[in-house]
Amino acid sequence: MERWSTSGEPVRRATMRDVAALSGVSIKTVSRVINGVSTVSDELRDRVTRAIAQLDFQPNLAASSLRRTDGATRQIALLLEDVANPFSATLSRAVENVARDHGTLVFTGSLDEDPQRELELVRAATLHRVDGIIIAPAATDHGYLHPEIRSGTPVVFVDRPPRGLAADAVLATNTEGAREAVLHLADHGHTEIAFLGDARTISTVGERVAGYRAALAERGLPARPGRLVQDLPDTASAARAVAALLDAPHPPTALFTAQNLVTIGAIHALQERGLHERVAVVGFDDFPMADLLVPRVTVVAQDVIRIGTLAVRRLFERIGGDDAPPREDRVPTTLVVRGSGEIAPPP
Amino acid sequence: MERWSTSGEPVRRATMRDVAALSGVSIKTVSRVINGVSTVSDELRDRVTRAIAQLDFQPNLAASSLRRTDGATRQIALLLEDVANPFSATLSRAVENVARDHGTLVFTGSLDEDPQRELELVRAATLHRVDGIIIAPAATDHGYLHPEIRSGTPVVFVDRPPRGLAADAVLATNTEGAREAVLHLADHGHTEIAFLGDARTISTVGERVAGYRAALAERGLPARPGRLVQDLPDTASAARAVAALLDAPHPPTALFTAQNLVTIGAIHALQERGLHERVAVVGFDDFPMADLLVPRVTVVAQDVIRIGTLAVRRLFERIGGDDAPPREDRVPTTLVVRGSGEIAPPP
DNA sequence: CACCCCGTTGACAACGTTGACTCGCCCGGT
DNA sequence: ACCGGGCGAGTCAACGTTGTCAACGGGGTG
């Protein structure tokens, strides 16, 4: 036998009016009890509390924030490249953890590197009057956010800096990380190091290219144009690009893959050719299973959890009224040595 | 020079009142224009539209849904085990895609297998008056959801069925999938097949055990109690459990790992012992990189995207007023043959 | 005894929007 | 000229809550 019947007339939710009527007090007293105002006598507080329990009353947060002076909705938006990719998913979890402590719900949305989609989602967020926005942007100009910030919705950037707008940002040390990766390969004897990255419209890619170039210069290695491949949007195209490099005359002996999916595509291509124990690889950004592959994959890891945590903390500071000038935080990367980056070049 | 100054007095957001004043019409006409009511003359519609643009007016969705008869907030909640794990992340993306078409935002939360956390998040969702909830539950009794459903917040279960409550559910064919995996191992000559799974409080685990037992019975193989290991919460404990099995007398020659993290732990343990080319493994649930490991990992894959899509579609049907009796949808699994499951037992 | 202050409670308006209703106008039919 | 109908626009109240202010009773003070 079922414990509950699910069918039947939908039941109206109890409101403060109902609670007030049942407990014989004014609506305002119910409000006071709910908001923990201390000037309510124990007896009334008791009656109200019991009525709330009896009616299963749940205050309507939307009505509340509509009326309140601060207008807080206890919702923030988190706009990421794609919630299904590990970087975004981990970030999302870090944000959720901090938001939970603030009694705040998190809306997540995927931008798919589409500026149009970014506009739509930001607009959806402001229609819902979120208290703040964390964004890993796809657009190249963020001036459109200015009215939102002016009207009190703080925005914190993660992973990629704002352009055409002064706003807080929490970023990885992309240039330094890339430099460290390439130096690592050079110091293992490689002189022919290729760079493979995704869309050059993404600012982090530019920083990583800069780090690559800096490291080559530092070691007195030539920066051959054919060794720098960009605009690889997915695993498959990365694999094709690596295959092309390897099949050309004077193939590189080491690869610096500047992004997650590119690293994976590269490994695919190397495995296919049986070169995965011959060609050195260092990837930017760690990924699950990197330590289960053969060889295990050396990466420059971003501290994604720290990035997310700092970003959401900053956001809550802003929501709390902090109006210091915008700040850019850089979170250092870590070189994780696992094997693929320590393969020596052929003699 | 900065294009915008971010500092200064926060600016009040424009309301319908402002738009009405600027365009010289009543507030109600503004409302009509915004809601696309056809009985507005072209001239007024024009004036209002221009005023909206000029003031950058964005309607307050919360106020709107407070007043509207249907009370829709265009928000749904998605409560998953952990948004950072690939299963949840993929599901989340599938839900987002459909929700987007309905102009609805998705707020995600992680339950971490904690029933208490489930109660808190469901409560947070109803405080925000979400239009519906999709949940992969951690609790073992869902009677507490009945008042919510009665008061008009539909709930759809994914991955795990409701208990103590009649509600829609979209689930994988766990028993059949597990059965297929174990039959596959048996048909490659294995007679000593171990089962490794996570917490037995999770209903899917029970179904997968049932499939395991059914397959053994079908092939006339004995179900030795020592071969059935459960309650492995994470990768590390799975690795330890596999190590213990392998070090015992009469070790199994094949493993059926009934969950993602368990599969990964098992592979770790096998690699450590150099047995990854000797002991066969079939995992339940696919995972990224499964086809880059050596050997590539044979799995029974769930169609996560389909599960998510069906669930969110069902939810929107309910939101739309469908009051048919609750339904349970089962989404079939697929055996993905890659190598690890086709290793023959030692002669 | 008049006065004021304090702690507790309630009445009322307001947040930004939409539903129900009303009002005026123009048109067609007689 | 009169009436009915339909259309465009406006008025008012209400959604569920909180801010403001006033009222009330009791106790301490001069």
Image (cartoon, coloured by chain):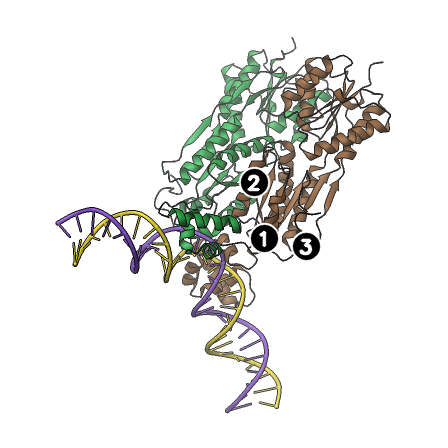
Chain colours: A green, B brown, C yellow, D purple
Q: What is the secondary structure assignment of the residue under circle 2?
A: helix
* Residue A163 in sight from this viewpoint: no
Pointer 1 and pointer 2: residues touching (CB < 8 Å)? Answer: no
Q: Count residues near mark 2 (Cα–Cα under 10 Å), then give few for <14, some for 14-19, many for 20+.
A: some
Vertical side of B299 occupied by B28: above or below: below
Question: Label 3, on which residue?
Answer: B323
Question: Label 1, on which residue?
Answer: B151
| Mark with earlier residue (3, 1) | 1
| Viewer-side residue, A4 vs A333 | A4
Question: Label 2, on which residue?
Answer: B119
Vertical side of B216 occupied by A96: above or below: below
Q: Residue at x 52, y 28 (%)?
A: A305
Q: Is residue B101 left or right of residue B49?
A: right
Q: What is the secondary structure assignment of the residue under circle 3?
A: loop
- Three-letter residue code for mark 1: Ser
Q: Position of residue B277 (x, y in %)?
A: 76, 16
Q: CA distance from mark 3 to mark 2?
A: 25 Å
Q: CA distance from mark 1 to mark 2?
A: 17 Å
To which chain does the residue with label 3 belong?
B
Q: Position of residue A17 (x, y in %)?
A: 47, 57
| Mark with earlier residue (3, 2) | 2
Q: Residue at x 64, y 40 (%)?
A: B141
